[in-house]
Image: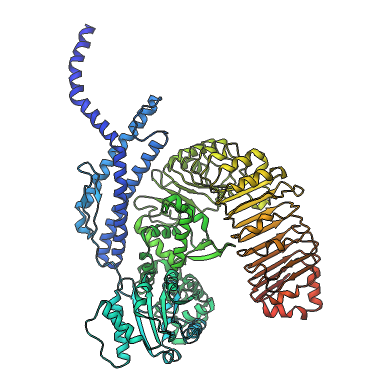
Amino acid sequence: MCDQVVSLAREQLLPLARDHLLPVLKEAANMIRGVPKGVAEMKGDLESIEDFINDAVRMAEAEEDHTRDGIKTRVKQLREASFLIEDVIDEYSICEGHRPRDPGCATIPRDTAGFIKTMMLRLQIAYKIQNIKSEVDGMVKGSDKSGIQIQISSEQGQNSSSGIQNLTLNNLQPDPLKDEAEVVGFEAPRDELIRWLVEGEEAKRTVISVVGQGGQGKTTLAKKVYDTKEVIEHFRCHATITVSKSYNVDSLLRDMLQQFCNESNKDPPQAMEGEPLRAEVTKHLQDKRYLILFDNVWDINFWKVIEYALKDNKKGSRILITTRNMDVAMSCKRSSLVLVHQLQPLSRIKSLELFYKKAFFEFDGDCPKNLLDVSAKIVEKCDDLPLAIVAIGGLLSGKDRDPFQWERFNETLSFELEKNPDLSVITKILGLSYHDLPYYLKWCFLYFGIYPEDYEIKADRLIRQWVAEGFVKDEKVKTVEETAETYLTDLIHRSLVQVTSLASDGKTRSCRVHDLVRQMILDKIQDLSFCHFPSSENEKKPVFDGMVRRLTIASSCNNGMGSVETSNIRSLHIFKNEELPDSYVTSIPSRHRLLKVLDLEDVSLYHQVPKNLGDLFLLRYLSFRNTKVENLPGSIGMLLNLETLDLRQTLVRELPREINMLTKLRHLLAYDISKGVGYGIQLKNGIGDIESLQTLREVEADHGGIELIKELERLTELRMLGLTNVKGEYTSALCSSINNKQHLEKLYITAVNGKEVIDLHHHVSAPRLRKLRLTGRLNNFPHWVRNLNLLVKLSLSHSMLTHDPLESLKDLTNLQYLSILYHAYDGETLHFPDGGFRSLKQLVLRRLYNLNSISIGEGALCSLERLKLVNISELYEVPSDVYDLKKLQVFHIVNMPEFEQNIDRDIGKFQWIIEQVPFVSIAERTWA
């Protein structure tokens, strides 16, 4: 009976399996095999969608509200489609990345269960690809109603993915704006520009540029100068031309020629263009001293195409340019003398004066006492931007003088900027700069909105996060970090980003954006779903609207951390003063498995590193800086894509051996400067396997000894190396290791204790070294330092040198910062040789207890701007040669009682310094 049942089942089930199950399995197998190709094709679609979104956002700015809302809706749909594509690509990367073999799956893993799991994941990805294609096709069919025309092309036949190939956009450029503002506080810049125009090298044509951000008053200043009687009378021929972004050279020349002819009461030539038009302009100017104002220049190639009509006739002609971009000003250097005036923000006093002038014009700019405080708050939010001050002051001039209403306006100013038509001019002008950015710079610029208001952002932190996000192009000839530096410089030159501090080598150390620029960024972020900010607990609006890509949790928010359980966010930034809940920290890897950036810097985090940290396979940037984290789990070795690991100011001292598996790691930073020198990290053998490392500091050398130093030779890509606890016996191996690092730019070496001699007397070749810090005893000053032609900063500490090292350093042509600290020199006299240290800008001498005399040779220290003397107990008088330091701006004397008493006894001897140096500080007394 049993055999009959089995036989019957076989007869019925085999045909069923053949006719129904096998086709399904074959289809699934084909879908699985097609996943790599499908993913590759979707990458192309993703690039097309990004291009279209960029153009659509620009078009939306120029349309009426109804049309603009429709475009924004379509942009949001396209953006979410791009997010889905990114998710599929990243999920595929995770699926394949955990298996160290080719994506084709040609071989079956030994672990059959693992193989089946991988195939199931691939099948899921295949179905997602199908669904996304269907969704994008649906958008294409419905695109006519949105005003965005999307077409499909199949370059690879019927099996190619949907490719979005064409987008027709019109009316991208907003109407030209009128003059930005009438401002005060331009007296000094006006006088300088007038002097440049009518004086200087008389014969040569000179290009004078006024550079500043939108709304700062460039046009107003330039026109004030242009219309000055002294300037008008100095030139025989005048023209003022508005250039803008979409200029036509022939149109500009015709306008110019028309103004020339009007001035001389002549009829302009008719219907000229091209070369004849250029020749006519040149002919008209050939024997005249002329002044031409080109207002609002955006294109860095503008001068290249216009200069041929404006020949240098050696009559002392001047070209006046206003621009937001420093590169525009610099581009004129190829063929002309160039002078640049970079507009500085108004002083707070002048900002208030301008605000009062606009808001209280009927009182002749006299602010009522009951509005003084709130007026100061409003002006502070304007951040000294003239355009904003004038627009807001003008708006408030029509309101009642009720302090409560004004306080309410101040509290809702962000909303007013967005909704009030009287203030829309501010966002429009600032928005022009945003729309002029190339696509790759837009994302970098929007990233500033992730950080809280008035947050001072460290440049290296920002750059590494840009790289981790994939915003930076790989240009092959330089590192992606170097490319990202040029991006930041570009944003600075375009007057969109403000530098808040500079490093000793002149590079940007930290930066920020203007408050009003940040408000414009936040508007763009919302439209593009670039980042989301959980609302505070007392707000009723929904936390999220649509898909979440980046998440910023501020210190005032507690309800956002549990609101994104299933979201595929790519970066998580937390800015919280209070301690994070254990439950949230430990759940990060499971909640946000597609993270690329996890920034927990300055968070009150105590020993809470999840053991399954390695599940964040795509993670590229991880920062625990300034937290109380003590150790890292071994699972960190699974973060095979990690590029930056920041452990500075943490309690982590020993890294797990698994760290050596991170072959893509580029920046490993760990030290606690608050505890002084000698605190770093301990590494296990194998660090030499991470050959991509560019930054490694600080490492406790005595933990691995000479073997560790030798292993460091393999790290040939290092740009920055910091070693602590160095012993004298390591120096030979260390010199050999340094010689193997021809890209090395920064080197920091600290001895294990004050008695250890770390003489680096062997030959060292470090042609690109720019910063050097040696902390520890030196019997002899390293002779090779004098050959470091690119050295910008040198710091010596605890060296106990008995011979003056300055003779060896005098000819370092690029040295700008020198510090000699804590027994670095135990001699009695320091002499700066004649003509030496010509580029030095900052000099710090601290705790040199035997030093009683400083002399400065003729022509030495001619560029010195800051001089600081600290705790030099035997030095009683200011070196008389300081009088010759014409560029000295700051002179500090700290904790030198005998020196101070000597000044008190005869202040007259010191008076010449007080009169010559802008800022002088001795103990608690300051002259400025």
The relative height of residue 297 versus residue 780 in the rendered view (above or below) is: below
Residue, far top: 1
The relative height of residue 817 versus residue 20 in the rendered view (above or below) is: below
Decide if residue 900 is in sight here.
yes
Which picture quadrant has residue 127? top left
**Colour pattern of the rendering:** rainbow
Please state, as top left, top right, bottom left or bottom right, where the C terminus lies in the image.
bottom right
Where is residue 425? Give x, y as percent: 36, 73
Q: Residue at x 28, y 41 (%)?
A: 129
The relative height of residue 138 versus residue 655 in the rendered view (above or below) is: below
Where is residue 534? Give x, y as percent: 43, 53
Decide if residue 555 is in sight here.
no
Please state, as top left, top right, bottom left or bottom right, where the N terminus lies in the image.
top left
Count of numbered circles in the view? 0
Where is residue 666? Give x, y as percent: 51, 47
Query: Who is closer to the viewer here, 243 or 76?
Result: 243
Query: Who is closer to the viewer here, 613 or 798?
Result: 798
Which picture quadrant has residue 909? bottom right
Query: Who is closer to the viewer here, 479 or 577?
Result: 479
225 relative position to 138: left or right: right
Q: Residue at x 75, y 78 (%)?
A: 910
Where is residue 4? Give x, y as percent: 20, 8
The relative height of residue 359 versus residue 593 in the rendered view (above or below) is: below
Query: Who is closer to the viewer here, 331 or 565?
Result: 331
